[in-house]
Image (cartoon, rainbow, N blue to C red):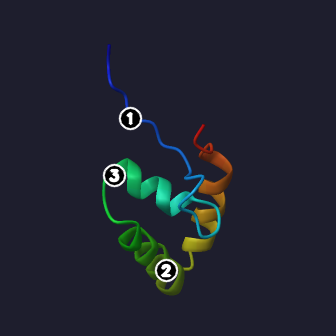
Amino acid sequence: MSNVKRLYRSRYEKKLGGVCAGLARYFEIDVSLVRLIWILLTVFYGAGILAYLLAWIIIPEEP
């Protein structure tokens, strides 16, 4: 049986929608690093807010 990684929004480690915590768990990195990247995308490119909202809608919450 194959062990397939699934991307889910975190139900418990969330600050807003659980997107950053879910991505951190999927890529096995620290959640603070993912949140920092989102902040940098928002400040420098303005794409962070839109990307977060899209991810919040598209990525399902963990069961």
Q: Nearer the viewer, residue 11 or 45?
A: 11
The image shows residue 56 at horizontal and vertical percentages of 64, 56
Crowd class of label 1 (few under 14; some 14 to 19; many from 20; radius 10 Å): few
- Whole-angstrom CA distance, mark 1 to mark 2, is 26 Å
> Which label sits on residue 5?
1
The vertical placement of 39 against 20, above or below, is below
Please give the label number shown on residue 16: none
Side (left or right) of 3 relative to 23: left
Amino acid on which the number 3 mark rests in the picture: Phe
- Of the two numbered discs 1 and 2 on the same chain, state the one appearing first in sequence: 1
- Give the residue pinned by disc 2: 39
Query: Could you say where residue 30 lies in the image, as x and y percent from the top left?
Result: 34, 65
Residue shown at 49% from the left, 80% from the top: 39
Would residue 2 be found to the left or right of residue 14 on screen?
left
In this image, 59 relative to 20: left or right?
Answer: right
- The amino acid type found where label 1 is placed reads Lys
SS class, disc 1: loop
| Residue type, mark 2 in image | Ile
Which residue does the image show at 33% across and 25% down from the upper left? Answer: 3
Tell me what residue is drawn at x 38 percent, y 35 percent.
5
SS for callout 3: helix
Q: Nearer the viewer, mark 2 or mark 3?
A: 3
Specify the quadrant that holds the C terminus.
top right
Residue bearing the label numbered 3: 27
Label 2 close to label 3 by CB (< 8 Å)? no
Task: Tell me the distance, in whole angstroms, between the alpha carbons under discs 1 and 3.
Answer: 10 Å
Q: CA distance from mark 2 to mark 3?
A: 18 Å
